[in-house]
Amino acid sequence: PVSIVAALAASARNGVLVKGGVYLEASANLNAIAFDKTGTLTAGRPTVVDITGLNGYSEEDLLARAAAMEAHSDHPIARAVVDCAQNRFIRLRSADDFQILPGRGATASFDGVQFWIGSQRYLEERELGTETVLQMISERANLGQTTVVVGDENGVCGIIAIEDTARDGAKDALRSLRKSGIRHLVMLTGDNKGTAQVIADQTEIDVVRAELLPEDKVAVIETLVATHEKVAMVGDGVNDAPAMGRATLGIAMGAVGSDVAIETADIALMTDDLSRLPWLVNHARRTLMVIRQNIGIALTIKVLFVLLTIMGYASLWAAIGADMGASLLVIFNGLLLMDGSEDD
Ligand code: ADP
Ligand code: MG
């Protein structure tokens, strides 16, 4: 218990909130880690880089409608669109019948006409994708940009390109994890394949699973758990909280993460710093090693005294001294974990 408490305290001091000793044990034995893209591998602060009105819609009109539809969503993409409209002092169109479609986009109606905003996948589900629009989306995807499509019941009114850069240090963190022996690093995202691949190349992740709805992310985690047993899922809680719940270990980004994420997670990275992940793995492994050492120390002393007693060399006071000594040794060895700086 002393080792565990010391290890948990050191974790907290190093920006990692671990909700119990069992999660440290799980962190030491991971075989695979799945990462959400938006907000986890990327900074989660996307910005609008380009707006293209189509079919007679002006940039302003498009943005006014898009921002109105996004006003009630807390998705990072929604925030980017709303911020862009605000920066350009565009008055939002008044809308009603808001509906959020998790992992897809949102809908609302303007003067009784329904409009929607969402991913390429959602565009395809509505069967409104034309050759030109799909071409424009793939051009932007090759630049690592995510395209959000705006449309009505009959077609596409325009597209908004959004850029979210890979998080600083993500690549180094993934490298260290690989060096610690965790060989399967997977990206899960609801974004389209092209955009996902660009971020995957920047962060050197091996496997990309794109165009996933929140329930697909859960299914992917289930197959990962079936093949690799000990699997962690790192996410920001936006459309990935169920997947985090299903993994062996749910790890939330604590600062950009939603309340649900921090609530469902077993571990939270309080500073959103991915370099804390390899730290956590090292720290957890060292904790288990100290616990094993302690069990070893305690048992050796006990066995030694049983032998000394049988041979007639042990006195009562020596036995008491050895017992207390063993306890103190174990406690001091455990307290060494209080300082987590060695695990960097
Ligand atoms: P990720 O898995 O990368 O975190 P999400 O599952 O949250 O992404 O979203 C998947 C895709 O669905 C986004 O890339 C975006 O195109 C679209 N999307 C989701 N929510 C919204 C929204 N509120 N507005 C526009 N597009 C959205
Ligand atoms: Mg996300």
Image (cartoon, rainbow, N blue to C red):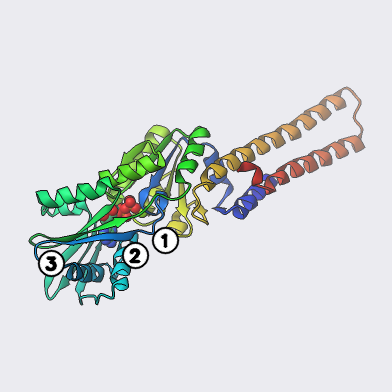
Residue 313 lies left or right of residue 184; in this view the side is: right
Circle 1 SS class: loop
Q: CA distance from mark 1 to mark 3?
A: 34 Å
| Disc marking residue 258 | 1
Please say whether residue 223 is visible from this viewpoint.
no
Q: Looking at the image, is mark 1 or mark 2 earlier in the sequence?
A: 2
Q: Residues within 10 Å of mark 2 (few under 14, many from 20)?
A: few
Q: Looking at the image, is mark 2 or mark 3 earlier in the sequence?
A: 3
Residue depicted at x 38% and y 48%: 36
Q: CA distance from mark 2 to mark 3?
A: 26 Å
| Disc marking residue 74 | 2
Q: Are marks 1 and 2 in contact (CB under 8 Å)?
A: yes
Nearer to us in this view, 213 or 92: 92
Residue kind at label 1, given as amino acid type: Ser
| Disc marking residue 57 | 3
Residue kind at label 2, given as amino acid type: Asp
Residue 238, picture quadrant: bottom left
Q: Nearer the viewer, mark 2 or mark 3?
A: 3
Circle 2 SS class: loop
Q: Decide: is 331 above or below 252.
A: above
Q: Residues within 10 Å of mark 1 (few under 14, many from 20)?
A: some
Q: Residues within 10 Å of mark 3 (few under 14, many from 20)?
A: some
